[in-house]
Image (spheres, grey):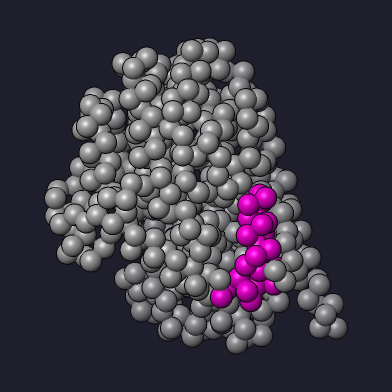
Amino acid sequence: MKVMWLINFAVPIITEGEGTTANVNEGWISGMLNALTNYNGVHLAICYPQKKSEDIQYDVIANIEYVGYPQTEDAREYDPRLKGKFVQIIEKTAPDIVHLMGTEFPHCYSMVEACIERKIKQNLVVSIQGLVSIYAQHYLNTLPVNVVYGRTIRDWIKNENQYKAAQKLKNRGKYERQALALIPNVIGRTDWDMACTMQLAPNAHYYHNNEVLRKSFYDGKWCYKNCEKHSIFFSQATTPIKGLHIMLRALPLIKNRYPDVKLYIAGINISAFPAYKISSYGKYLKDLIREQALSENVVFTGPLVEKEMKKRFLASNVFVSSSVIENSPNSVGEAMILGIPCITSDVGGVKNMIKHEEEGFIYQTDAPYMIAYYVDKIFSMKADATLIGEKAREHALQTHDPIINGRELVEIYRKIKNENTEDDA
């Protein structure tokens, strides 16, 4: 059986060969790729975006086909030429199943169009990740009005602000909604994505399949003795959706009890950009840090690749996710599987991942004072917090079991293929 994946970014094996920077936000792709290498009956073709050529790039690495389609400068814009490119790719690769890894970008809809033209729509399946049409409804949650509508020099030049950013997300969501209305098979894993599927793809068959995390996170375990005491790790902070502003509003309350507290934030420091580059959200973060006298307590680590991210997790006293919307954040899964005490906002499908007060703590999304309360609780527990981390680890090892999840995914492929073969008979 041949399966073609459509992914949003090139996987590390491609970026390493090209000498380009790997995307650090879709580690679950590499995780599931590793899980499927155990199945001899599944041949993979991975379709990914590339900007080095207007021609389709074909390659085979370790028995996996890699097909690079030409991407425009802005992947968030619909490119009408892509449908034809995807038709060519389908004709050459001849997949039994076409698996779309997420719906966040318009190229997903282009692939649906191509599958319809090639009369293989029933062989389509999509894995729900974030849903931009739903995320757009939450994008501005907890942001002050002056940040929503305010503009910096950079925003004036680009004719942008946070309100317009939310609208752009909503516009991208139009292609997502059109795609989901046509796709017959959906893979999800939480109550949230099932509820969204019922609204956006009411006629689709829903399959459950948990994700596989990045390989290195299955080895190693958090130890209180080895962590930096009173340190907090925050794994991503480039957009308001990730809620760094909520964490920063909690930090002064934590600092009152723990003056030495350190908040480590993975990624670039968007609050340190010069005036002509800083966005209104970056300026908001900068103001929060300055006005609350947090400059000595906040550390931006820069982008972290897999092993660096794992090292930072293990070095921290607690992990916090304060997103305003998520499905099942991989960062929470990675924290849990390493056994790090975890605090997360009550959004999306988080409740399907972690049991409150047994495996970590879930707080009301717009209540930064509750982050402070739970951080204090974990700091005060000292080595006893290991018990919570161990329960979280047990749960995560089951949820993200690569053998079980890989086997279930292959079974989903077989069901789709066999059902459609029977229909054609």
Measured from the top left, where is residue 270 in percent x and y? 26, 46
- Vertical placement of residue 109 versus 303, above or below: below
| Residue under the image location 49 percent in, 72 percent down | 174
Measured from the top left, where is residue 120 in percent x and y? 67, 80
Q: Is residue 206 in view?
A: yes
The extreme front residue here reads 145
Position of 168 with respect to 161 (left or right) is: right
Q: Nearer the viewer, residue 115 or 371?
A: 371
Q: Nearer the viewer, residue 214 or 161?
A: 161
Position of 17 with respect to 114 (left or right) is: left
Q: How many marks?
A: 0
Taking the magenta stretch, the answer to whether it contains residue 183 is yes
| Residue under the image location 77 percent in, 65 percent down | 414
User: Which quadrant, please, contains the N terminus?
Assistant: bottom right
Measured from the top left, where is residue 292 in percent x and y? 25, 29
Residue range corresponding to the magenta coloring: 178-201
| Residue under the image location 78 percent in, 76 percent down | 420
Q: Is residue 38 in view?
A: no
Asked where in the image residue 69 lies, by quadrant, the reply is: bottom left
User: Which quadrant, please, contains the C terminus?
Assistant: bottom right
Asked where in the image residue 298 lies, by quadrant, the reply is: top left
Position of 201 with respect to 414 (left or right) is: left
Asked where in the image residue 346 lies, by quadrant, the reply is: top right
Taking the magenta stretch, the answer to whether it contains residue 147 is no
Measured from the top left, where is residue 276 in percent x and y? 14, 55
